[in-house]
Image (cartoon, rainbow, N blue to C red):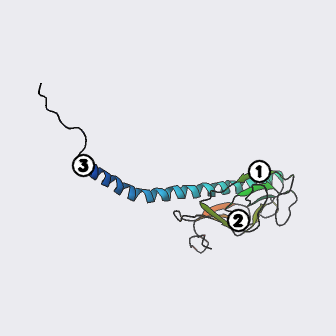
Amino acid sequence: MAASQHARGYSLYELLMTLLLVSVILSVGLPSLRSVVASQRLRTEVDRLFHAAHLARQTSIVRRRAVTICASRDASTCDTGGDWSGGWILFVDDDRDRPPQRDAGELLLAARHVDPRLEVRANRRAFTFRTTELRATNGTIVLCDRGGAAAARALVISYSGRPRVTRTDRRGRPYACDG
């Protein structure tokens, strides 16, 4: 029984070529995958704020009360300033205080923490949506990926309280989170 034995497995040359091919594919694919993931993360947070603005507008009309969205790090009270990167809250502002502040007994409708990989800035400390006879606080919330892998997006809230998402300002320039 003299059967010839054939070596099973891969040669060193085949292994090196496979590793080279895999490394080329990864070097081309990983940066674009990083961009896709960062863009999706940004889109998710924009969508959350977009839906919160719609909920605020709807609730203010149905309850005939002022409803406010403001920056909040502790998910309970409003922060001062325009940095929304720590999170935000949505609440019924029964006493309509200025600047808006959530007081004891005011209904908290939503509270969100923002992904730490995102930077969120607004040109307003808070956005208040009022009943149909009064206008809402207008302004812009700009969201950026801290790593720079995704293009900035902005949520623009009109005087009527309608939100829209855009990547460029009214002059056609892309939004940025620099400074």
Give the side of residue 119 with respect to residue 18, left or right.
right
What residue occupies the far left of the structure in this picture?
2
Q: Residue at x 74, y 66 (%)?
A: 159
Q: Tell me the SS state at disc 2.
A: loop
| Structural crowding at the residue carrying mark 3, measured as other residues with C-alpha within 10 Å and reported as few (<14), some (14–19) or many (≥20) | few
For residue 41, the mark is none
Q: Give the residue at the far front of this rendering.
A: 1
| Mark 1 or mark 2, whichever is nearer to me | 1
Q: Secondary structure at mark 3?
A: helix
On the image, the x and y values in percent for residue 90 come to: 75, 55
Q: Amino acid at mark 2?
A: Ser
State which quadrant residue 103 falls in: bottom right
Mark 1 sits on what residue? 109
Q: What label does residue 12 carry, if any?
A: 3
Give the residue number, with chain letter if any, for mark 2: 158
Nearest to N terminus: mark 3 or mark 2: 3
Q: Please, what is the three-letter code of the amino acid marked with disc 3?
A: Leu
Disc 1 marks a residue whose amino acid type is Leu
Q: For residue 157, which quarter of the picture?
A: bottom right
Seen from the viewer's position, the closer of residues 154 and 172 is: 154
Residue sitting farthest toward the top: 1
Question: Where's residue 21, x and y in %?
Answer: 31, 53
